[in-house]
Amino acid sequence: MSSRFFPHDIIQTDAVLSLDEDTVLSTNEVDFSFIVWHSFPDRIVGYPARSHYWDNSKGRWGYTSKWTNEFSMVLTGASFYHRQVLLYIPRNICHLIYKWYYHYLYTHYLPTSLHSMVDHMANCEDILMNFLVSAVTKLPPIKVTQKKQYKETMMQQGSKTSRWADPDHFAQRQACMNSFSSWFGFMPLLHSQMRLDPVLFKDQVSILRKKYRDIERL
Amino acid sequence: MSSRFFPHDIIQTDAVLSLDEDTVLSTNEVDFSFIVWHSFPDRIVGYPARSHYWDNSKGRWGYTSKWTNEFSMVLTGASFYHRQVLLYIPRNICHLIYKWYYHYLYTHYLPTSLHSMVDHMANCEDILMNFLVSAVTKLPPIKVTQKKQYKETMMQQGSKTSRWADPDHFAQRQACMNSFSSWFGFMPLLHSQMRLDPVLFKDQVSILRKKYRDIERL
């Protein structure tokens, strides 16, 4: 699983569009999220949002896919991110600037133990990427609105073929949250309450006037 | 009109909530836009969006309040902005940092000729503030979703009492666009296609689960 983020030399564009094999996106959706990514090039910009929370009863971090009023992860099954990131190290009024690549950081900065965990379970590589990017940026990811039938479509597909059908899948992801935060030494994920929609999204004007009209069709 | 942006010593909060006398906002709307402003503290964050365009037939800048797929101004009749802004002047790998206040820049950096124009017409101070902030940030403002009946409410109120009823009002605003861009020497306004909505905005889940439920009620 970790190999999906390997820093291949062949990747020369600034933007990386990461997709799972069963992801369904319209061209409108790709176009709009690419526009949004231009405004937030150092963050993960995409569709499926998840959240973390502190589970008091169990004394550990929890993971939820419920639709709530906030999120802290955007899954890399359908998202844009920059292949590189600029790290600013403040030194008085000067800043030393380092240019890093997210794929490079994922592959060479993160330890073998986390890679092995991800590869062994064939799970959580998307959570780990969210930990990494938020640890670097100190910012939450960006959620873009999506057509709501995807969830059902993906679950139907999942019930036949994909890894989402695995009953252990969710429990594994809970475990990942805690292993990852333990290695980082803190919880880098941050919550956001905002979603990025096209300006006229769901406004009561003719659909013909809307540039990204496919996004709001059910 | 220019005095609304005077740098009064009494303003000590970082956020300034600017409102016209006939603006109607719910607490949900103020709460959400304040949350959004936290993520974009150097930009104007608010509701009524307008746009500029180049009018080829007249060879001048145009101003429009039509609901289109992009905008370049958010009117200060209902918006948040920071009382100050950090200006970074790059010097090799060092950055000199100056702290300026938008009210100070509006009052002391902009020339008397533009202040006089605004005061004489009792119009365009909101456009001028958008020119100023975009010239500083090199970024467009942030539009937050709003309840749609405001437009009608404001127009009804306008037909009785407010300056929006003045038939010259729109023509004046066209003229302002061109006077302002002439003084700046370029067009600082930039377009955006994004709107900031609460995560569950218009999603098909119970309204009771939504934190900012008033925003989407018609």
Image (cartoon, coloured by chain):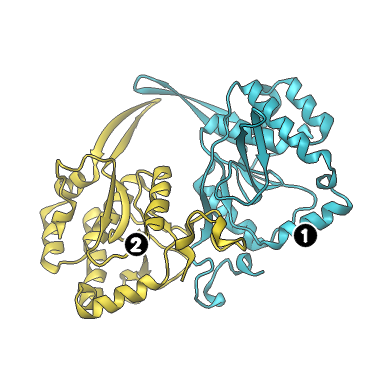
Chain colours: A cyan, B yellow
Which residue is denoted by mark 1 in the rendering? A153
- SS of the residue at dot 1? helix
Q: Mark 1 lies on which chain?
A: A
Question: Residue, x 42% and y 47% (percent of image)?
Answer: B35
Q: What residue type is labelled 2?
A: Leu
Up/down of A208 relative to B84, above or below:
below
Gap in angstroms between the C-alphas marked 2 and 1:
39 Å
Front residue of this view, candidates A57 and A45: A57
The residue under the point 50% across, 75% down is A204
The answer to whether residue A29 is above or below residue A53 is: below
* Outermost residue to the front: A57
Q: In this view, does A202 lie to the left or right of A164?
A: left
Q: Position of residue A191 (x, y in %)?
A: 54, 40
Name the image quarter holding the N terminus of chain A: top right
- Whole-percent x, y for residue B66 in the image: 39, 73
Residue A20 against residue A125 in the figure, above or below = below
Q: What element carries label 2?
A: loop
- Of residue B209 and residue A211, the one placed in the foreground of this image is B209
Q: Can you see residue B56?
A: no
The C terminus of chain A - image quarter? bottom right
What residue does disc 2 label? B25
Give percent across and percent down for residue B153: 33, 74
> Which corner quadrant of the image does residue A152 belong to?
bottom right
Tell me which chain the residue with mark 2 is part of: B
Q: Relative to residue B185, is residue B48 drawn left or right?
A: right
x and y, in percent, of residue A64 in the image: 67, 43
Whether label 2 touches label 1, CB < 8 Å: no
Disc 2 residue crowd, few under 14, some 14–19, many 20+, Cα 10 Å: some
Q: What residue type is labelled 1?
A: Thr
Q: Is residue B208 visible?
A: yes
* Number of numbered tags placed on the structure image: 2
Callout 1 crowding tier (Cα within 10 Å): few <14, some 14–19, many ≥20: some
